[in-house]
Structure formats: structure tokens, C-alpha cells
Image: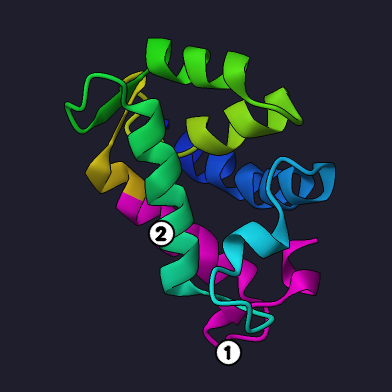
Amino acid sequence: MKAMSGKLVFGLSLLILPVAFASGAVTFETLDANGDGKVSRGEFRTAKEKEFRKMDKNRDGVVTSGELATAVDAHEGDKAAFRAQWKVMDLNEDGRISKSELSSGIYTAFSEMDADKDGALSRQELE
């Protein structure tokens, strides 16, 4: 049942990520680092990895529930959406987000959000 709940939570994350974008927690311009009007898988990964490094205060390669709470408190924008989009990355539900969970979560989220399967996210796919 734990695996099923993980899939359900991940499914919900696909609803939350666009909410974070729409709320201003994430901007298209921030994600589209090269300004070409689309967000590549690499740009998406880079943005999420940057956020992960910022949250991992002790640099042990894991974001703990305490580090996540600190990041949420400091976050400007929709705090609930920010927390939710990171909590879904905790695939094994141990209260910590490892680099491996981050990598899997990023890949899956990007693939699901890329509705036209062109390998890039448009502004519309993020809204």
C-alpha cells in the first residue's frame, strides 16, 4: 500500500507544480535560463537541483524534514505549494529527500508535465 500512496501523492504533485508557477513561487523566466521561450529538461533539473542545494544546509546530500521546514519558512510565495512539491519527492516516505529521490522525481515530473512530448516545457504546460 505504501507504493500506491506514493503514486497517488506524486500524481497530486502534477497539480501542485503548476499552482506554484501560477502563484509566483516559480517564474517561467527563472526556469528558462537561456531565454529561448521554453524550459528544457536540463533547465528544469538545474533549477530543482539549485533549490535542493540551497535547502541542504549541512551539505550531506539529503534534505531532512527540518531543512525543508526552514526552506518553507524562508520561501516567498505560496508556502503550501512549495512544501507540497518538495514533500512528494520523498518517494520512500522516510521524511528525507535524497539526491536519488530528487533525480527520479524531477525526471518523472518533467515527463508528465511535457504534454506534447517535445522535450521542453512551454509556458502553457507550466500553467
Residue name at image x 46 percent, y 38 percent: 6
Which residues fall within the magenta stretch?
103-127
Q: Which residue is mark 2?
A: 46
Q: Amino acid at mark 1?
A: Asp
Q: Residues within 10 Å of mark 1 (few under 14, many from 20)?
A: few
- Is 64 or 74 nearer to us in this picture? 74
Q: Nearer the viewer, mark 1 or mark 2?
A: 2
Query: Where on the picture, by quarter, is residue 91?
Result: top left
Q: Residues within 10 Å of mark 2 (few under 14, many from 20)?
A: some
- Is 98 or 67 nearer to us in this picture? 67
Q: Is residue 119 magenta?
A: yes
Q: Which residue is mark 1?
A: 118
Return the x and y of residue 48 as percentages of the image width and height: 45, 50
- Give the mark nearer the N terminus: 1 vs 2: 2
Whole-angstrom CA distance, mark 1 to mark 2, is 19 Å
Q: Is residue 120 magenta?
A: yes
Question: In the picture shown, does residue 4 fall above or below 83?
Answer: below
Q: Secondary structure at mark 1?
A: loop
Q: Quadrant of the N terminus?
A: top left
Query: Where on the picture, by quarter, is residue 9?
Result: top right
Question: In the picture shown, does residue 66 fall above or below 115?
Answer: above
Residue 109's disc number: none
Q: Quadrant of the C terminus?
A: bottom right
Return the x and y of residue 102 as percentages of the image width and height: 35, 46
Residue 67 in the figure: left or right of residue 116 = left
Return the x and y of residue 43 as percentages of the image width and height: 47, 68
Q: Secondary structure at mark 2?
A: helix
